[in-house]
Amino acid sequence: MDTNQWLVVGLGNPGPDYAGNRHNVGQMVTAQLADRLSSNFKRHKTAALVAEGRLAPGEPKLVLAKPTTFMNVSGSPVAALLRFYSLPVSRLIVVHDDLDLPFDTLKIKVGGGHGGHNGLRDIIAATGTNDFIRIRMGIGRPPGRQNPADFVLHDFAAAERTVLPNLIADAADAIELIASDGVVAAQQKFHSPS
């Protein structure tokens, strides 16, 4: 068993209709990491698409996963992946959208509640713990009186799409840094001073 590996789960909804939604920004990050690893996603028996690889020889192995279930039932595939790869939950990094952070903001956090995010709620329920690493991708609040549930299921606005590649690249960089140097190093580099 490879002890130097990490499970990186990008949350989102399956299928092309949802691919560009704000809710799927986590899957956009895992797609970028797969490109960096020159690895392709393949169907896995855990109800997920999985890509694996190392950025360089001797570097930690990254197991990238996109659950093929809908966001609200992400927990079962995540728990199954942890079992399949014999990984403790401390080696789990979940990448997800966050309404409570301004757009183009990135926060790295260990533990905590689900903040109303149903994907996180289901993962906490399925794994029996909240003690995993989260990459929180800020998508901002919906304008006016728009329902947050509708907002997250819309694609990013044109102005946001010009900035989005930088946010996705930063999140991918943060995950690489967590895998190599730990959470604190990544927080020090990617948290803007407030």
Image (cartoon, rainbow, N blue to C red):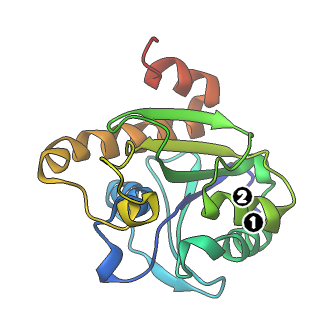
Mark 2 surroundings: few (<14), some (14-19) or many (≥20) residues within 10 A: few
Identify the residue at image location x=31%, y=40%: 167
Q: Furthest residue to the top?
A: 193
The Cα–Cα distance between marks 2 and 1, rounded to whole angstroms, is 13 Å
Q: Which residue is mark 1?
A: 82
Q: Position of residue 143 (x, y in %)?
A: 30, 47
Q: Nearer the viewer, residue 102 or 25?
A: 102
Residue 34 appears in the picture as rendered: no
Closest to the camera, between mark 2 and mark 1, is: 1
Left/right placement of residue 167 relative to residue 163 reads: right
Q: Position of residue 130 (x, y in %)?
A: 78, 49
Residue 82 appears in the picture as rendered: yes
Q: Which residue is mark 2?
A: 2
Q: Position of residue 166 (x, y in %)?
A: 25, 39
Q: Secondary structure at mark 2?
A: loop
When the figure is inspected, residue 19 is found, relative to residue 174, above or below; the finding is: below
Identify the residue at image location x=18%, y=54%: 157
Q: Which quarter of the picture shows residue 150? A: bottom left
Give the residue type that dot 2 points to. Answer: Asp
Identify the residue at image location x=51%, y=53%: 96
The N terminus - image quarter: bottom right
Q: Secondary structure at mark 1?
A: helix
